[in-house]
Amino acid sequence: MDYVVRSLKQTLGDAHPDLLTFQHELAGACQSDGQIKRAVTLLEHVIAAEAKILSEDHPDRLASKHELARAYQADGQLRRALELLEQVVAIEENTLREDHPDRLASQHMLARVCQAVGQTNRALKLLGHIVALRERTLSEEHPDRLASQHEYAVAYRMHEMNRAI
C-alpha cells in the first residue's frame, strides 16, 4: 500500500482528490485492522490537504473529519475527537436538514464521545433528539433507529447509575 501511495503522490500530486480518497479509504482499512495510529496519521494528512482545496462545509472534508474523530476515539484521544465532532456537527447543523443521515450520524458519534468523557447530560440530550427524529422517519426495525435507541438506553442507564453514586 505504501508503494501505491508513493506512486499516486508522484503521478497525481500530494493533494489530488483521487489520492485523498484512496488515503481516506486506506485509513478506514487500517483502523479496521487495528492500525489506529496509522489511520490517524493518514487522516490528519488528508484533512490538511483537503483544507487547501475544499470548502469547510464540503461533504468529503466533513466525512474525513468524522472519520478522524472516530480514529481519535479508537486511539483514546477523546478530547480531540470531541473537538473535531463539535466542528462537524456545527457545520452540518447549518448545511444539512435536521433528519439528514450524515448529520444524525455525526450527532450520534458526538453523543458517544460525550458519554465517554463524562458529559452524560449532553449525550442524553443529543441522543433523545436523534431517537425522536429517527422514530418519526425510520421503520421500527431500521438498524439506525435501533442503534440510536440502544445508545440512548445505555446513556440513560449510565446517567442513572452515576446519580445513584
Image: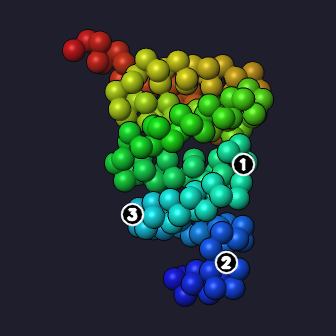
The amino acid pointed to by label 1 is Ser
- Of the numbered discs 3 and 2, the one sitting upstream in the chain is 2
Q: Residues within 10 Å of mark 1 (few under 14, many from 20)?
A: few
| Residue depicted at 68% across the width and 29% down the height | 93
Which one is in front, 9 or 65?
9
Classify mark 1: helix, strand or loop: loop
Residue 75, image x, y percentages: 37, 53
Q: Quadrant of residue 154?
A: top left
Residues marked 3 and 2 touching at CB (< 8 Å): no
Residue 146's mark?
Answer: none
Please say if 76 is above or below 90. Answer: below
Residue 64, image x, y percentages: 60, 54
Classify mark 2: helix, strand or loop: loop
Q: Residues within 10 Å of mark 2 (few under 14, many from 20)?
A: few
Please say if 72 is above or below 143. Answer: below
| Residue depicted at 41% across the width and 62% down the height | 36
Can residue 99 be seen here? The reply is no
| Residue depicted at 53% across the width and 34% down the height | 86
Q: Which residue carries the number 1 mark?
A: 55
Can residue 17 be seen here? The reply is yes
The amino acid pointed to by label 2 is Gly
Q: Residue furthest front?
A: 52
Front disc: 1 or 3: 1
CA separation in Å, label 3 and label 2 = 24 Å
Which one is in front, 159 or 77?
77
Q: Residues within 10 Å of mark 3 (few under 14, many from 20)?
A: some
Residue 130 appears left or right of 79: right
Q: Which residue carries the number 2 mark?
A: 13
The amino acid pointed to by label 3 is Lys
Which one is in front, 59 or 129?
59
Q: Which residue carries the number 3 mark?
A: 37
